[in-house]
Image (cartoon, rainbow, N blue to C red):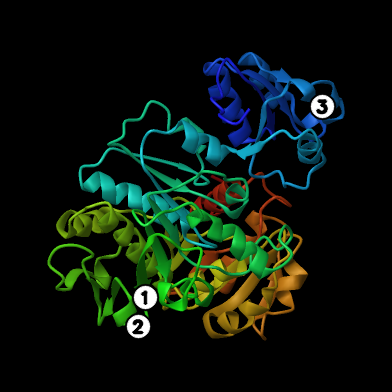
Amino acid sequence: MTDFTFDAKETVLVIGLGKSGLAVTEVLRARGATVYATDEKPPADLGAAIASVEAHGAHFTAPGDLATLLDRVDSAILSPGVPLTSPAVRAVQQHNIPVFGEIELAFRLCRAPVIAVTGTKGKSTTTALIGHLLRACGRSVHVGGNIGNPLIKEVLNLNPDDWVVAEVSSFQLETIRSFKPRVSVILNLAPDHLDRYHSMDEYAEAKFRIFANQSPSDFFVGNLDDERISALETSRGEPRMHARQLWFTLGDRHEDATIYLHGDAIVYAPIAGDPRPIAVLERGDIPLAGEHNVQNVMAALLAAFAVGCEAAPLREGVRTFRPMPHRLEPVAEIDGVLFVDDSKSTNPGSVAAALHAYDRPIVLIAGGRSKGTDFAELSAPLRERAKALVLIGEAADEIAAHAGGVSVERAASMDDAVARARALAAPGDVVLLSPGCASFDMFRSAEHRGECFVAAVNALREPAGA
């Protein structure tokens, strides 16, 4: 079978029962497909997931029992958290069953054009901002993917004049086949997920799959300031790149860029019509902290310009955008100390960007579960920007080894970390939660970690004994 319809004519195995896998199960069952689902977690941890699967008329099968049904399976849908090397995937591949990712399935069922965003940091902010900008320009927009809501739930019953904006991870891009965004965006590349990839080259190649199927009628938005990404520039002879290239920069390569900084103005060199550069907005119009967010805004503007938006509504769209939860989100100012939640920071590069976002002394709360990354790149930013460092979680010692002489304290919980940080901070300082690690050693998710931080900060304002 080569033409998959994912409906009543087919039997599909869903591998992985996280948020994405459960959404796939629900959609496939609604389309009439026979669905089996499996997950390699202990059965005791899967009670709610199995109940959800069965409530939709699908069948749960333990990994050890897959051999009994694989002869009946037409295709498998893989959740992004499950590596291609997992035993379940290998068993499926040994039966010559095609494996698709959720993002590929969503694309095949979607009638609307897609703008896809990837990168090591800034994906969610940029994805949400593109959606916000397109709405400001009167477009009908649906936002999903790795941003938190499975793309498969956003793409059904859309019209060709709608738009889909998708945050896509390297994990999701591993399993694409025909996925072909109208606009692809790569924001940056820095060490991340090196517990899954053997090298930065392998990680970058997974990201580069975002443009693999694009044609000259599509657009690619890239970061000229990132050496690995700028190497894709057409003039360097990159044979895999067929889309029309649009570049952003904070540096001085204005002649190669489609959007760039001139003083404090963000300037756009139009890709159609009057070629004279347009000053779109001022840096001060951006309601987000940090130079990295200037880059995110540039990337979002280029994606919007690529689909035909005009400068005036885009300018207003940027001005009215607000930070996403847990991404450099101000929580409170208490006794002159600003508390900021950047819990979605899960790699050292994100911590470095967060440290450079404020011109105030910073007490940093960091730590969690390492993803195989090297924390050495934090040494210089910590020396330059951090007043003190409060560490939590499994990676505390790894980070402390690169503290660069900055005062270090260790905390046993988020409440303890916030209390210690508050004691170290003075009026005018920032207490910044930017962990640079995964959350799963102490918390259910990065969102849960941020919620615990917010609760601990709010508790500082409670009168004693209240």
Count residues near mark 1 (Cα–Cα under 10 Å), then give few for <14, some for 14-19, many for 20+: many
Residue 394, given in percent of the width and then of the height, sits at 76, 61
Which residue is drawn at the image coordinates 56% and 64% (left, top)?
434
Q: Which residue is mark 2?
A: 253
Tag 1, which secondary structure? strand
Residue 302, given in percent of the width and then of the height, sits at 31, 61
Going by the numbered disc 1, the residue's amino acid type is: Thr
Q: Are marks 2 and 1 in contact (CB under 8 Å)?
A: yes
The nearer-to-camera label among 2 and 1 is: 2
Question: Is residue 293 or residue 408 the one in the foreground?
Answer: 293
The nearer-to-camera label among 3 and 1 is: 3
Q: Which residue is mark 1?
A: 249
Going by the numbered disc 3, the residue's amino acid type is: Leu
Q: Which residue is mark 3?
A: 66
- Mark pair 2, 3: CA separation: 55 Å
Tag 3, which secondary structure? helix
Number of disc labels: 3
Residue 181, given in percent of the width and then of the height, sits at 42, 48
Going by the numbered disc 2, the residue's amino acid type is: Arg
Is residue 360 visible in the rendered image? The answer is no
Which quadrant is home to the N terminus?
top right
Q: Earlier in the sequence, mark 2 or mark 3?
A: 3
Residue 461: mark in rendering: none
